[in-house]
Image: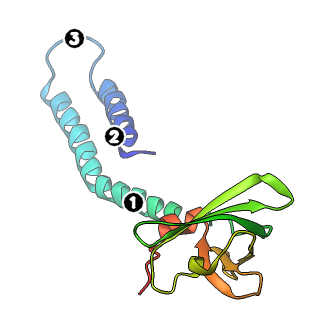
Amino acid sequence: MHLLSKSALALAVLGMNLATVLPAQAGNLTGKQQSAVSAVVSAYAISFIVVSPVLLVAGGSKAASNSARREKPAKAAALPPMAVQAVERQPDGGYHVALQRPEAPEQNALVDWPARPDNPAARLKVGDVLNFAPTEAGAGWTVHAADGAALAFLPTPEAAATQASERW
């Protein structure tokens, strides 16, 4: 329950208790009735002040435990080999590599390799076949050339969104 709804519940209980202390008829309160109302209001006010931090801490720890139990992202599954359809060098030194499944021409992909001195995309040519092997941790695929040489790591969308992938 949220703190606000608990506060509303406490006020409702206070109102019910005041209704039992106060007489049903309108009029002035006697000294005894004023003492009873004062005692009830004081007790609820003190209870609310004491319990509020506890409720806030309990709510925060519940939120923390819920975030710790988030679902793990799906692991990278095996992908079929893809043939290089086009290799385009970009002005910044990176490469756009268009890929296509040989047995399913409607399934295409585009891989952008950023600029770097030892860019593996520089040696790719149209017709080369690339294989995608899921990594052991499942955060992506290792891209292999037809000769088995590892070219790059390609992260899953979830892994790319949550991890910095910068070359050090």
Q: Residue at x 43, y 78 (%)?
A: 166
Give the foreground label among 3 and 1. 1
**Secondary structure at numbered mark 1:** helix
Q: Quadrant of residue 74?
A: bottom right
Q: Which residue is mark 1?
A: 60
**Secondary structure at numbered mark 2:** helix
Q: Which mark is residue 7?
A: 2
Q: Mark 3: which amino acid?
A: Ala
Q: Residue at x 70, y 69 (%)?
A: 126
Image marks 3 and 1: residues in contact by CB distance under 8 Å? no
**Secondary structure at numbered mark 3:** loop
36 relative position to 134: left or right: left
Residue 24 placement (x, y as % from top left): 30, 15
Q: Which residue is mark 3?
A: 26
Q: Mark 2: which amino acid?
A: Ser
Residue 70 placement (x, y as % from top left): 57, 63
157 relative position to 46: left or right: right
Total numbered labels: 3
Q: Residue at x 80, y 53 (%)?
A: 105
Vertical position of residue 37 compared to residue 30: above or below: below
Colour option used: rainbow
Q: Mark 1: which amino acid?
A: Gly
Whether residue 39 appears in this view of the structure is yes
State how far apart marks 3 and 2 are (Cα): 28 Å
Q: Residue at x 47, y 72 (%)?
A: 114
Whether residue 68 appears in this view of the structure is no
54 relative position to 62: left or right: left
